[in-house]
Image (tube, rainbow, N blue to C red):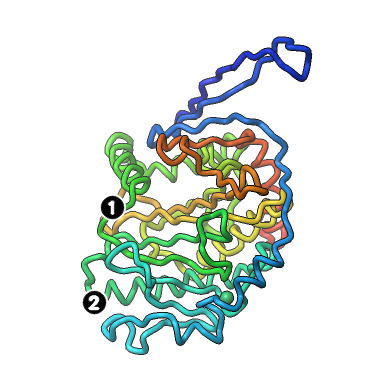
Amino acid sequence: MKFEVTKKEAVILDPTHRMQVKSIPVEVRTDPLTGRTSRICHFRLLKFERPDLNRLIEASRNTCPFCPEKVLEVTPCFPPEIAPDGRLSRDDQLLFPNIAPYDGLGAVATLGGRHYLPMTEIEPQRIAGGIGLALDFYRRVRAIRHPESVYYLLSWNYMPASGSSLIHPHLQVFASSTAPNQLRQELAAAKTYHAQNGRIYWDDLAAAEMAEGSRYLGRIGRIEWLAGFAPFSVVGDVVAVVAECRTMLDMTEDDLRGIGQGLSAAMAAYDKMGIYNFNVCFFPGAETDEFARLHMVFSPRIYYNPVLATPDATALRTLYDESICVGFPEDIAAKVRPQFQALSHRNGDD
Ligand SMILES: [Zn+2]
């Protein structure tokens, strides 16, 4: 496992110090699996202003299609072969077709009736319930051998900077025979890795990170938690590797609970930095991909300029597909780790 770092420096004459020579460090990190690069640069304090969100939340409430008074009227239903009752439910959480699907099979799962759930109030069991509802959906489309039931995909855009057009918390649940770019590239590289080493890349990654330690966050049940070495997010990623699982359907209730607990820990840590938007994606293999290991990436989002609502997805990120991270992932891991340690003390399994 090679964690490759190329160190560079930019030299400027600094206008804030009488044009004295100043060296600004930049690191280019290469993902050990895919070779994707991520730049560690634009260093800044990991402390962000959180604006008053009350107006935004109140203004969006009346027209929200996912609030309990509207949801059964305005959201679509599945044909009977997928859901005889039209929609699936668990407690106060509902799953129904996405009215704007990405593929032949697209659904949305609400995380309950509350229009706005602050990041620190999203209970682990609510997250587990939402993913459980997604698994109910995957089982049904698998049972009818739907042609799209190859990759079971789940993503979460939380709050507007993440790309979410709604405040009301919800998961994007879909199944597709077409793996999205990043997943396809990861699986292709993992297949090569498996052929060369006879091992699954993510198992080796988790072991290497645990041994190295500076990005390792902890274990919950059989799930290993790490800070991403070459992150997607401007403020670092939290990665979960679910041992022994290939697809979403391999997860047990214990795994769902563990994912919920770990995500809550990550949210609590980033909340302390003033961050309140994030993306999550699960990366599964197909059932027959013996080289795949189910993993998940939690990737917080910020506004570069909150006053202008400037997104953190610039030309560099969108067209060059190059990530930048404004802090060293090891320093970010040190901020996130205490939340995971607190969790393992509570669980009594450290
Ligand atoms: Zn709502």
Report x, y in % for residue 150.
Answer: 27, 61
Q: In which quadrant will I find the N terminus? A: top left
Q: Nearer the viewer, residue 295 or 172?
A: 172
Q: Are marks 2 and 1 in contact (CB under 8 Å)?
A: no
User: In this figure, what is the number of numbered marks?
Assistant: 2
The residue located at (35%, 66%) in the rendering is: 101
Report x, y in % for residue 170.
Answer: 51, 69
Regarding ligand 1, which quadrant of the image does it lie in? Answer: bottom right
Residue 348, by quadrant, is bottom right
Please give left or right for residue 251 compared with residue 21 in the image.
left
**Callout 2 crowding tier (Cα within 10 Å): few <14, some 14–19, many ≥20:** few
Report x, y in % for residue 181.
Answer: 33, 46
Q: CA distance from mark 2 to mark 1?
A: 21 Å
The residue located at (72%, 37%) in the rendering is: 45
Q: Nearer the viewer, residue 36 or 69?
A: 69
Q: Is residue 66 above or below residue 16?
A: below
Q: Nearer the viewer, residue 301 or 53?
A: 53
Judging by the rendered image, the residue that carries numbered circle 2 is 144
Q: Is residue 6 above or below residue 142?
A: above
Disc 1 element: loop
Judging by the rendered image, the residue that carries numbered circle 1 is 289
Please give left or right for residue 334 compared with residue 150 in the image.
right
The residue located at (54%, 39%) in the rendering is: 209
* Residue type at tag 2: Ile
Q: Nearer the viewer, residue 22 or 339?
A: 22
Residue 61, by quadrant, is bottom right
* Residue type at tag 1: Asp
Q: Residue furthest right?
A: 17
